[in-house]
Amino acid sequence: MTPTVTFWLIIIVLAAGTWAMRSLPIMLHGHVPLPAWAERLLRYVPVAALTAIAVPASLYLKTNGVYHLEPPRILAAVAAMLVALRTKNVVATLAVGMAVLWAAQAFLPRLG
Amino acid sequence: MSRTRHSLGAGARDIAPILLGIVPFGLVAGSAVIAAGFRLPEAVGMSLLVNAGASQIAATSLYAEHAPLFVVIATALIVNARMFIYSTSIAPVLGDASWRLRPLLGHMLVDQNYASTMTRGRFREDVDVIPYYIGAWLALAGVWQLSTLAGALAGPLVPPSWGLDFAVPLVFLALLAPSLKSRVAWEVCAVTAVAAALLVPTLPMQTGLIVAMLAGMAWGAVRHTDAEEVRA
């Protein structure tokens, strides 16, 4: 196989598998009843998913596959979370988070 | 303006601030495909067909590091396994969709669209949730395609030192905050946060994210009582 054929194979298998995982529950809804324990388990998916994505990306920077703690990001994420809890506003959260990140990147190394 | 058009527009408008976080991601996904030795059709085709940035970047970089084909595909699919959980969770919200529309709605399910629809769209009384969800995806997909294309043509463009990728966790924090309305929701957040902080850097094949999510979900299932009935 040429590299291009191999890569297209990766794309197609990945696309089909991802589509199946995304679509089957939506397609089967109403046809296959969900057991009570599964409904219970699904109740906090939004909270769990948002936390699981946001927390590592707020703590670490990944360079060449290695994770390091990144103090400017931690500081900026805490500030952004306080703004989010107070205002519930996405734009304000983004603005404060990015501003604190840039300020911390500019000033933190001089402290350390 | 009809209610459907209003709902499409509302979905796109609610997702607008989130789009900023997609751009650096798309630039990286596009430029990685070129850096791995391929051309525009592969970069654009991957974004159109797979439509899941983290798994695209994982698959492309593993391929470029000469990982075995099985590892490339398995890792990328594990990265996307959370979408099965999203789909099960959002299915009742999209339950009025026809059987013809449902396979397409499935393809549109990405983190940002799931989060926006579940934390905001489904509670808005002025919109129908299905066109809201489609409108949000159209805005996301447009920006995703254009930024992948730009990344493929011009490279990452935005210097990594700007840290624009940080917009991704910021958006998720902003959407998380309004969901923390009960004691159990805070507990689920804390359990997931600790698990994700410990497991994401340590577990192999990027399984940490999904394991952390399942830990939080299990905590919520055990601790939830009907008195705790909230829009979690």
Image (cartoon, rainbow, N blue to C red):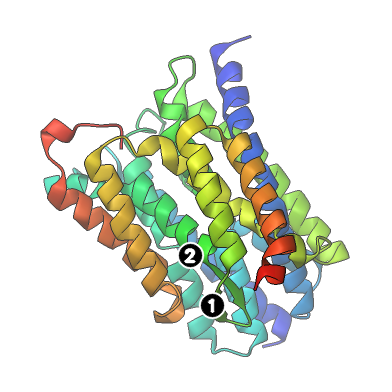
Q: Residue A80 versus residue B120: which sits nearer the camera?
A: A80
Q: Is residue B142 visible?
A: yes
Q: Residue at x 17, y 50 (%)?
A: B221
Quarter of the rendering occupied by the N terminus of chain B: top right
To which residue does mark 1 refer? A67
Residue type beneath disc 1: Tyr
Residue type beneath disc 2: Pro
Contact between marks 1 and 2 (CB within 8 A): the answer is: yes
Image coordinates of residue A28 in percent, x first then y, are: 31, 45
The chain identifier of the residue carrying mark 1 reads A
Instruction: Give the mark count.
Output: 2
Q: Residue at x 20, y 44 (%)?
A: A39
Q: Residue at x 67, y 88 (%)?
A: A1
Q: Residue B22 versus residue A98: which sits nearer the camera?
A: A98
Image coordinates of residue A73 in percent, x first then y, are: 59, 61
Along the horizontal axis of the image, is A92 left or right of B92?
Answer: right
Callout 1 crowding tier (Cα within 10 Å): few <14, some 14–19, many ≥20: some
Quarter of the rendering occupied by the C terminus of chain B: top left
Q: Secondary structure at mark 1?
A: strand
The chain identifier of the residue carrying mark 2 reads A
Q: Is residue B101 visible?
A: no
Q: Tell me how far mark 1 sits from mark 2, CA to CA.
A: 9 Å
With respect to residue B197, does B128 lie above or below? above
Q: Which of pointers 1 and 2 lies earlier in the amino acid sequence?
A: 2
